[in-house]
Amino acid sequence: GENVEQHPSTLSVQEGDSAVIKCTYSDSASNYFPWYKQELGKGPQLIIDIRSNVGEKKDQRIAVTLNKTAKHFSLHITETQPEDSAVYFCAPYTGGGNKLTFGTGTQLKVEL
Amino acid sequence: NAGVTQTPKFQVLKTGQSMTLQCAQDMNHEYMSWYRQDPGMGLRLIHYSVGAGITDQGEVPNGYNVSRSTTEDFPLRLLSAAPSQTSVYFCASSTFTDTEAFFGQGTRLTVV
């Protein structure tokens, strides 16, 4: 099955700084790479995703980059705000397994 | 449009009791799934369904049963609750297996 590692497990930044979270996966057949944000007491919510034929995707302050050769993809958040404080999960998808495999999560704290 | 609705939100069971966690979606999604979330372990797939009448096992299926008689509903049954099943359970649905997954608010289950 897919092995997914996510780093760091916790990340503390000052408001306005950038944050980067990295996700490494093992299955070279993975072809869909989403990032989910989970706020306290809620279910995860998709914030950005990328497919294997694209190297980078940006949506306002959030971007995802993909390196298929090295089998990792990263979440970039610029100009961080207190409302960005949450747990972030990567969840690479492999068609053969017919499922998303979630990383262990990164607790992001944006300090004033 | 309610999205994905899970009931109950909280539940306490005694060891050996059985119960059903309900999940309903109103987005006409074919794919539905159940995850459990434990501290430091991300979300792990229990069972999933790619359409009415079709279910399959995920990563941690033991002790759980599912059925999918309609597109809208995907209940999760705990056959004989054990303390190891204390967790937060999330139901999710999506159009396809590799598209945005919409999660419910979760059910916090405690088995004593």
Image (cartoon, coloured by chain):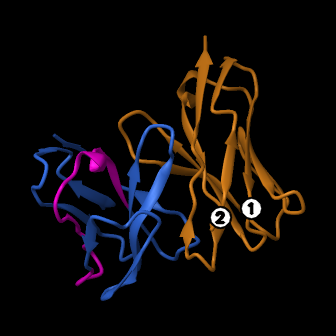
Chain colours: A orange, B blue
Q: Nearer the viewer, residue B63 or A69?
A: B63
**Residue at screen point 12% across, 55% down:** B16
Image coordinates of residue B44 in percent, x first then y, are 46, 56
Q: Quadrant of the N terminus of chain A?
A: bottom right
Which residue is found at the position 52% from the left and 77% from the top? B96
Question: Are there few (<14), some (14-19), or many (20+) residues within 10 Å of tag 2?
Answer: some
> Is B4 contained in the magenta span?
no
Decide: marks 2, 1 in contact (CB < 8 A)? yes
- The stretch drawn in magenta includes residue B83: yes
Residue reaching furthest right? A69
Q: Which residue is mark 2?
A: A2
User: Pointer 1: residues within 10 angstroms few (<14), some, or many (20+)?
Assistant: some
Specify the segment rendered in magenta.
Answer: B68-91
Q: Is residue B78 above or below residue B110?
A: below
Label 1 sits on what residue type?
A: Ser
Chain containing the residue with disc 1: A
Instruction: Tell how many labels.
Output: 2
Q: Amino acid at mark 2?
A: Glu
- Indicate whether A78 appears above or below A103: above
Quarter the C terminus of chain A occupies: top right
Residue B100, position as x, y percentages in the image: 53, 63
Q: Is residue A29 left or right of residue A108?
A: right
Reading the image, the residue beneath label 1 is A26
Chain containing mark 2: A
Q: Is residue B15 visible?
A: yes
